[in-house]
Amino acid sequence: MTMAGQGARCGVFFDMDGTLVDSEPLTDALILHLVEEHGLPPPAFPLSQFHGVTWKQVAATVSVEYPE
């Protein structure tokens, strides 16, 4: 076994696409929380349309549904 600094390589793995952790339920919950926090009715569209898209895309879609 080698120690760091003695030829060992260290790294960090970031799971940014849901490979290790399914973050879609968290995204759905956050969107519902934000809508509720602003006193708006629940969305009439499936939240699954936001899976795999950027928050910018989410904001654009939500702003069409809730124009105020």
Image (cartoon, grey):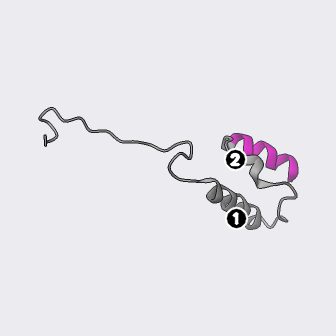
In the picture, the disc for residue 65 is none
Would you say residue 40 is visible in this rendering?
yes
Where is residue 32 drawn, in percent x and y? 73, 62
Q: Residue at x 69, y 47 (%)?
A: 51
Q: Which residue is mark 1?
A: 33
The numbered mark, 2 or 1, whose residue comes first in the sequence reads 1
Where is residue 9 drawn, in percent x and y? 24, 35
Q: Which residue is mark 2?
A: 51
Mark 1 Cα-neighbour bin, 10 Å: few <14, some 14–19, many ≥20 = few
Residue type highlighted by circle 1 = His
Specify start and end residues of the magenta stretch as a single range: 56-65
Q: Please state if 5 lies on the left or on the right of 67 as rendered.
A: left
Q: Name the one closer to the observer, 24 or 65.
A: 24
- Say if the magenta span includes residue 9: no
Q: Name the one closer to the observer, 5 or 65.
A: 5
For label 2, the SS is loop
Would you say residue 67 is visible in this rendering?
no
Q: State the CA–CA distance, disc 2 to disc 1.
A: 16 Å
For label 1, the SS is helix
When the figure is inspected, residue 65 is found, relative to residue 34, above or below; the finding is above
Going by the picture, which residue comes out furthest to the top?
Answer: 7
